[in-house]
Amino acid sequence: MERADLDSVLSWFQDVEDLARFDRTTRVPLNTSHAEEFWRDSFTSSDASRKCWFIVESSAGEAVGLAGLESISNINRDAVVAVFVNKAMRRSGVGLRASALVLDLAFRQLGLNRITSYYREDNHHSRDLVAKIGFQIEGAMRQAWFAEGEFQDMVVVGILKSEWMVRRNVLAQELDANTIVTLGPNDCADWSWPPRIAEV
């Protein structure tokens, strides 16, 4: 993620009701200076060993979402994954492919063994996404997510490297190549989802 991506991120973070379905920490619209402060570590390498965020782009180069890893632990070899997709692109497969790509990065490049994620209990889009990826429900944190004047349970899900490597092969065969998500330039075929069949 680069500073130039901030305008897109800022526009998504103005819809507080929508944001509250995906992020349990931000409850007010961010202005530019707050957004720069919030995302500063993503622009620098100072905290790169603990987090990494990427802008998800359409094939036309338009920013359509974010995907990343937080709380990366090199001791426990785990992290937390988070994905946000612009409303207009939801249910198009972008979130699924971006999630798969970040899991590939976590397990195949960073050597992690476990990835955790969370979602608000009433967020059925997130529930369906993590189920399709292969995450297992591990429990719920009761009334841990406050939004729209009430407390919601927060569902905790996780996936192990061994589980992902099996699910990855099946998912790569199921997904068509009409929608492709890439880390880096659009011609960077080494880090795209679905992966090339030879990689599977």
Image: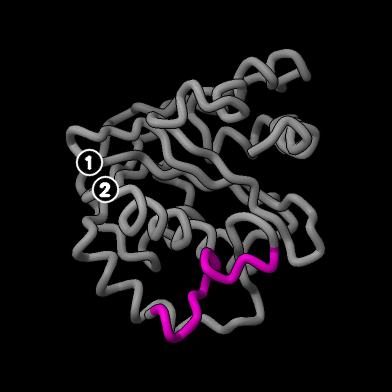
Residue closest to the eye, 59 or 119: 59
User: x, y percentage for residue 28?
Assistant: 66, 19
Read off the residue under disc 1: 77
Q: Residues within 10 Å of mark 1 (few under 14, many from 20)?
A: some
Residue type for callout 2 = Leu
Over which residues does the magenta segment extend? 186-199
Q: With 139 as the anchor, is 97 left or right in this view?
A: right
Residue to which mark 2 is pinned: 112
Q: Quadrant of residue 107?
A: bottom left
Task: Report the residue at 27% width, 50% height from top.
Answer: 111
C-beta proximity under 8 Å, tags 2 and 1 = yes
Q: Secondary structure at mark 2?
A: loop
- Which SS type dominates the magenta stretch? loop
Which image quadrant is residue 179 in?
bottom right
Q: Is residue 24 above or below residue 88?
A: above
Residue 13, horizontal then vertical, whole percent: 69, 32
